[in-house]
Image (tube, coloured by chain):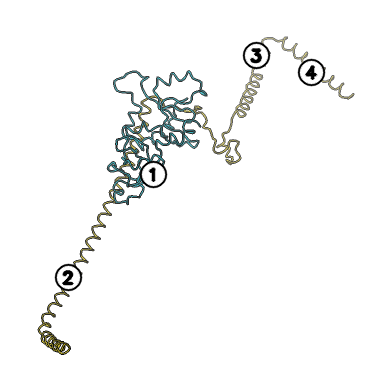
Amino acid sequence: MRQLTEEETRTLFEKLANYVGRGLNELIAPPSGSEDPNERYVFRMHQMRVYHVKLGLVGLATSIPRDNLLSLGTCVGKFTKTGKFRIQITALDLLAPHARYKVHIKPNGTQPFLYGGNVLKAHVGRWSEDCPEHAGVVVVDMNDTPLGFGVTARSSAESRKLDPTAICVFSQSDIGNYLRDEDTLFTT
Amino acid sequence: MAPTKPSVKGKSSSSKGDASKGKPLSSGTKISKKNVKRPPPQEMKSKARTEKSQLKKTKKRVYTEEELGLPKLNAITPVGVVKPKGKKKGKTFVDDAEGMMTILAMVNAEKEGQIESKMMKARQLEEIREAKRKEAEARMAQKKSKLDDVKQSIRQNKKHKGDAGASKADAPSGGSSKSKGKKKSVSFA
């Protein structure tokens, strides 16, 4: 396990900034009220995967041999061999509370989305205002339960004119991935 | 083999003889001869040193690849794997909160700018589309009103003609109805 380099940090933040707005500060800022540096959250890389971990836990994890350590903290995603960053569904817990844009989908649209399908206009219940094209959005159901994340196909203004079967959000990852990618989600 | 051996012996004996000759000379006149002889060997020594050191310096100099001007394909290191000299090996990690925050701030500002520009573009396009739509609507309304006017005028013309023609046409129509009635009566009768 190691710290991220400057370039890796930049790549990671650029990816996260697609989905998270100003709230990204809160992912690395020390929790308010605590002076203990061990309470601070940091990003650590282990076997090409990036984890969001409490600093105190990182110290404890040093007692475990590298080969035996499978995962710790919250896995955000992994770096490809070409240096790009792939965000995983496990990062949803980090993204959802600080999401820049949200798309609420109706109950009849949740199942198609959780099976890996894109979000159609007919399934959209509510939609963040002033959302541009190709922006990262967090998909939630009508009760505000996060279901996954994706990229908008059209801006919110344009999508009003679309027909009901047109695609509004391209799915990137959904909580169905926990089952579908069970074998490869935590192992290389 | 035979002729070489005596020659070597001879040489060695002659050199020994020179040395033996030199020794008594130096030992005989101690102060005066030393003073006279000192400068020349010193000069010789200094020259030799300088020469050697110069030679050493030229040998030590290492040319960089740029100075040599070799074509890159002939170099030992592949083009893609040129490691900068004098730089620290390995990765530079960012772990302190301040460093992370600065990177984050830069990334955030960049992203905000991108989104803003996207939104601006989208708004401008939307405005243009709206203006075009309104223009098209106005044109359609104009066309419709023109058509209505024409229709109205035609109708009015017809009415006028109909009023004028109705008085003329009444008489023949009445006559025809009478004749028809007569015909019917005839047929029934």
Q: Chain of mark 3?
A: B
Mark 1 → mark 4, Cα distance in angstroms: 103 Å
Indicate the position of residue A119 as horizontal and vertical percent values: 36, 44
Mark closest to the chain's N terminus, 4 or 2: 4
Identify the residue under disc 2.
Answer: B149
Against B171, residue B19 (above or below) is above
Point 37% across, 42% down: residue: A151
Check whether the beta carbons of the residues at disc 3 and disc 4 lie within 8 A of each other: no
Closer to the eye: label 3 or 1: 1
- Tag 1 secondary structure: loop
User: Which label sits on residue B15?
Assistant: 4
- Tag 3 secondary structure: helix
Closer to the eye: label 1 or 4: 1
Mark closest to the chain's N terminus, 2 or 3: 3
Mark 3 → mark 4, Cα distance in angstroms: 25 Å
Which is more toward the observer, B140 or B43? B140
Please identify which colour was used for chain A in the image. Answer: cyan
Relative placement, left or right, of B24 versus A93 is right
Packing grade of label 3 (10 A; few <14, some 14-19, many >=20) is: few
Point 16% across, 72% down: residue: B152
Indicate the position of residue B189 as horizontal and vertical percent values: 15, 89
Amino acid beneath label 2: Asp
User: Which label sits on residue A77?
Assistant: none
Against A81, residue A133 (above or below) is below
